[in-house]
Amino acid sequence: MSSVLIVLGHGSRNPAATAQFMELVGQLRARRDEPVLPAFMELAEPGLDAAVAEAVAGGATEIVVQPCFLFDGMHIRRDIPGMLSGFAAQHPDVAFRFGRPFGADPRLAEILIERAGEAECLA
């Protein structure tokens, strides 16, 4: 089975935010043997449809879409599952899997504590 991981971000008009996301994707690529592709819901490219098309064209038989979202909002509950259902209908020979958002993970609490300690005074 040829598996591809698509990391799905929300997207931003800010090029610096897109660059940070792409840096994270690069870090994931360095840790995995299987391909890792970036995708965005909106405001940046490539979109999820383009990433799925690239994965399928590359011979993927399994596509894991892992959202890089904090919580279980409407994109997670409605939009992305609807898109994945459409892709699955178009590509019946490809298994589509959908990961969970980060949620209230204790590892995030540790990062928040660390970042709060690094906070700088703006006044």
Image (spheres, rainbow, N blue to C red):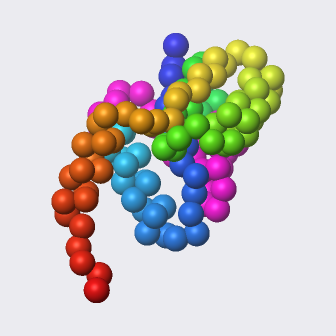
Q: Residue furthest front?
A: 123
Q: Position of residue 1 (x, y in %)?
A: 52, 13
Residue 51 included in the magenta stretch of the image? yes
Instruction: Write the start and end of the magenta stretch as one range.
Output: 30-53
Residue for point 53% across, 41% down: 71
- Give residue 123's quadrant in the image: bottom left
Say if residue 6 shows up in the picture: no
Residue that appears at 75% across and 17% down:
92
Residue at the location (73% across, 39% down)?
79
Q: Above or below — where is 117 with respect to 96? A: below
Depth check: give the residue in front, 101 or 82: 101
Q: Residue at x 48, y 44 (%)?
A: 70
Image spot of residue 105 (x, y percent): 37, 33
Left or right for 6, reference 116: right
The number of discs equals 0
Q: Is residue 35 magenta?
A: yes
Q: Quick check: 89 left or right of 62?
A: right
Q: Is residue 73 left or right of residue 34?
A: right
In the visual, does 15 lie left or right of 25?
Answer: right
Residue 119, percent across and down? Answer: 24, 67
Residue 86 in picture, x, y percent from top left: 79, 30
Q: Quadrant of residue 115?
A: bottom left
